Image (tube, rainbow, N blue to C red):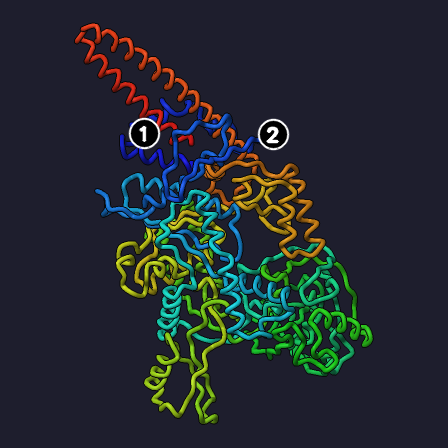
Amino acid sequence: MAASWSVMRILYFRHGLKAYKCSRNQNVISTVSPLSYFSTSSTCLKQNKKYEVFQYTVPTKPGEKKDVSVDLPSAYSPQFVEAAWYEWWVEQGFFKPRKTEKSDEKFVLCLPPPNVTGTLHLGHALTCAVQDAIVRWNRMRGLETVWVPGCDHAGIATQVVVEKQLWKESKQTRHDIGREAFLEKVWQWKGSKGDTIYNQMKKMGASLDWSKECFTMDESMCKAVREAFIRLHDEGLIYRSGRLVNWSCHLRSAISDIEVVNEQVEKPTKLKLPGYEKPVTFGEITSFAYPVMGSEEEIVVATTRLETMLGDTAVAVHPEDPRYSDLQGAFVEHPFDGRHIPVITDESVEMNFGTGAVKITPAHDHNDYSMGTRHNLLFINIINDNGEMENVPEQFNGMKRFEAREKVAQMLQEKGLFRGKQPHSLVLPICQRSGDIIEPRIKEQWYIDCAQMTADALQVVDDGSLTLYPEFHNKVWHEFMTSEKSKDWCISRQIWWGHRIPAFKVVLNNKEENSQDMWISAQSHKEAVLKAKEKLSLRDTEFSLVQDEDVLDTWFSSALFPFSVFGWPENTVDLSSYYPNSLLETGNDILFFWVARMVMLGQKLTGQLPFSKVLLHGTLRDSKGRKMSKSLGNVIDPMDVIFGISLKDLQKQVDTLGFDPVEMETAKKGQHKDFPDGIQECGTDALRFGLCSYQFKDPEIRMNIDHVQNYRQFCNKDASKIKEQLHKLELNRLATLKKIEILEKKRRKSQPDMENKIDQLYNKVKSIDGQITDIQSLSI
């Protein structure tokens, strides 16, 4: 499909769609439908069949048109067919918006910017293939078409990669070298990556307008991010608050829900965690007793996180539980620090689970946080940013949290309060970036009040202003927009790489007056000084400003993409011409993390929907239905499908991922099972053809490489038919030239009536030559 698009375009514009279809059906390929040729689940291809690879060796400078007069190779070879076309397409400006008779109609689409941290995978290839088909069709219809490429700075993901590299090279952390030096290393790393991702997109034939390429840390994008924050902060929609967040102790940062992987643990399981020499056991529940004060009774509670009992501030029972009716309002004594802990009642407690009594740690559990808020309980932070114990009795202070878990169990046994341990299934929240266990912690963070924006986003779907395809996503959208998760959005991250929050804390020189935090948001320190003086009626000598160290959640800058890429907040020609976008096409897994937030901030900051239609494709999984994961060895680089790769080289890729020996062995075993003979060269056309042939709007798509290889077989059949047609045309041409030769002899014998017949035959030869050229363009 990639190489043939250029010829399709020529035929379409030269002869119209009807003539293009006739030419395609009659002169180019057989009438065999590729979809009837094999099924989506077909595995009939023999993996051990080796294809011969032919290279296109005609010297061709980048941007020069490919020489289509050369002989075809003896067998179909994608590398021969697909070579040299893309650079010529770009040089000819085929991918730039063009004014046409339909210039009042535009089609605008933004490619979801992939993370700068690595190479594209088959999920990205699916997005490119689907979007490119849509874009090229609208371009062929004569619409002024814009498809915008970009790349995301991927705050946490990028920082993790560079930190690992820094440690590997010099045994230093980012804190050892400081913020400015670390950011310089990140930019160096980004520069060393070059245009790897963009080159992959080009190899996949994506007809993107490269003149509009952007990076989310470009200065124009940074200005847009700062402006968005300032407007929302000045309006009071961005505020600071101390709440429970997902905290990664290894990264020392809050992270978003999408960066938390919830792993089901069914039985006691040892996991290797960053910062721990020994594996830590999960999948157990421990019971212990709290002595009731002024009584011989005790209340037994159970927990999967025993270390958190050091921060317990209540024991809760159901108000109608008869076992504890006489203990409601009583107190139990904490065994390590003697604190008096109240026994409270709450209807959320499940009487039939365990003993019917639960320990409450409001500062380190989401459910307990809600209960603590309802009952005005004490909130005690017992785990610091690094995952070490704090605000606890001396014998536990400074211990790592999971080492403290063992110490607590030991001391409970010594005090006779330990009541046993048993297997217990649980869901373990794991940081996707570091492999650390998420610790719920109360931290002061920046939030966006999303109440009105979510109501507006719900309304546009209900009234049809925004259309979601497939339609079943309307129900999902409604459920999310009315849930607790959609209310307020934590947008601050405690890392260094990203958009630094443009907020400046006002520090009054008279320390006695610094009783309340005051923040000014501005594009620069100079602007912040002016705003502070005006807003707070201060003189220069009365205060100083300190900019917040945190950066913004990557999804904040991504939410501005449909309009920031065209120059917002400036009223640019591109912004007025190409915003709103016509369509958003993306994966259904980021419907809320990205799509909903683009809708909310687009409406709030521009007064318009960023797009009127959303097309969502399913999540790409492997042939067994498993999530694509490097640790399983089933993440595939599209280039490995296009060019082919041996099993040996696939496994060399695993060696570069920094896995521990167990993970590395698991990944390699997975590769050996799935690709025992490696991956055969399939080419761009077969890859795109295969990806587009799936029911991509299904919630999940099971990707089988055999399916792509079957489409390579179809391309081979297509090429064979083309060679057959070329042979027929050449025979026809030779026969016609033979007739001309005979007629020329007759004309020389004074037969003037031969002139018209000769002219007709020359025209026939010219027509045949044109057909041969078109078919060669399609084939080479």
Image vertical order of residue 715 relative to residue 285, above or below: above
State the image quarter where residue 561 is shown.
bottom left
Judge left or right: residue 287 versus residue 609. Answer: right
Q: Name the residue beneath numbered marker 2.
A: 49
Direction front: furthest residue: 748
Report the disc number at residue 20. 1
Image quadrant where one finds the N terminus: top left
The structure residue drawn at horizontal position 82% and vertical position 75%, both measured from the top left corner, is 414
Q: Height in image: 624 above or below 338?
A: above
Q: Secondary structure at mark 1?
A: helix
Q: Position of residue 128 (x, y in %)?
A: 44, 46
Give the percent coordinates (x, y) of residue 92.
32, 43
Residue 455 screen position, x and y as percent: 38, 62
Residue at image location 51% in from the left, 73% down from the top = 180
Residue 316 lies, with reference to residue 653, above or below; the image says: below
Q: How many marks?
A: 2
Front one among 726 and 539: 726
